[in-house]
Image: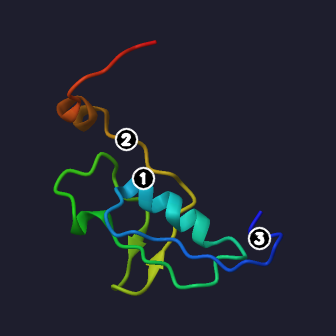
């Protein structure tokens, strides 16, 4: 919608997991994302990220995006799950 309207947009955060950062990177490649993104490698913030980062940063300013979305590590997911419900 904002792309069709010609509205420039931005994406970022700083506390995304590898999964969240991959989503932001995918969005940042769209045509109307014209402002620099605020994207960082998740290992800066998380000791145990639930996903292994697929995107590699060559420097604090340059990253090589991957075409693969990271898959959650099932063992870590079980380790940190407090409560679950199967529906």
Q: Which mark is residue 63?
A: none
Query: Residue 34 location in percent, x, y?
Result: 64, 83
Q: Which residue is mark 1?
A: 19
Query: Residue 67 versus residue 21: which sits nearer the camera?
Result: 21
User: At numbered mark 1, what does the secondary structure look like: helix, strand or loop?
Assistant: helix
Horizontal and vertical percent position of residue 77:
27, 34
3D distance between C-alphas at marks 3 and 1: 24 Å
**With respect to residue 24, does 68 lie above or below?**
above
Query: Is 13 left, or right, of 68 in this rendering?
Result: left
Name the side, left or right, on which 63 lies relative to 67: left
State how far apart marks 2 and 1 are (Cα). 8 Å
Marker count (numbered) = 3
Q: Quadrant of residue 54?
A: bottom left
Mark 2 and mark 3 in contact? Answer it, CB < 8 Å.
no
- Whether the residues at callouts 2 and 1 have beta carbons within 8 Å, the answer is yes
Specify few, some or many for label 3: CA neighbours under 10 Å numbering under 14, 14-19, or 20 or more. few
Task: Determine crowd level at label 1: few under 14, some 14-19, many 20+ residues with C-alpha closer than 10 A.
Answer: many
The numbered mark, 2 or 3, whose residue comes first in the sequence reads 3
Q: Are marks 3 and 1 in contact (CB under 8 Å)?
A: no
Q: Which residue does the numbered mark 2 point to in the structure image?
A: 72
Give the residue number, with chain letter if any, for mark 3. Answer: 3
Q: Mark 3 falls on what kind of element?
A: loop
In the drawing, does residue 68 fall left or right of residue 51? right
Which residue is at a point 72% across and 76% down the rendered structure image?
A: 31
Q: Earlier in the sequence, mark 2 or mark 1?
A: 1
Q: Position of residue 43 (x, y in %)?
A: 25, 64
Q: Residue at x 53, y 54 (%)?
A: 68
């Amino acid at each position: 919608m904002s792309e069709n309207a010609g509205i420039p947009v931005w994406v970022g955060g700083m506390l995304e997991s590898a999964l969240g950062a991959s989503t932001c990177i995918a969005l940042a490649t769209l045509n109307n994302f014209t402002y620099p993104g605020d994207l960082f490698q998740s290992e800066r913030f998380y000791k145990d990220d639930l996903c292994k980062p697929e995107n590699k940063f060559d420097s604090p300013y340059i990253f090589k995006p991957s075409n693969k979305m990271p898959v959650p590590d099932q063992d870590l997911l079980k380790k940190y799950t407090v409560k679950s419900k199967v529906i």
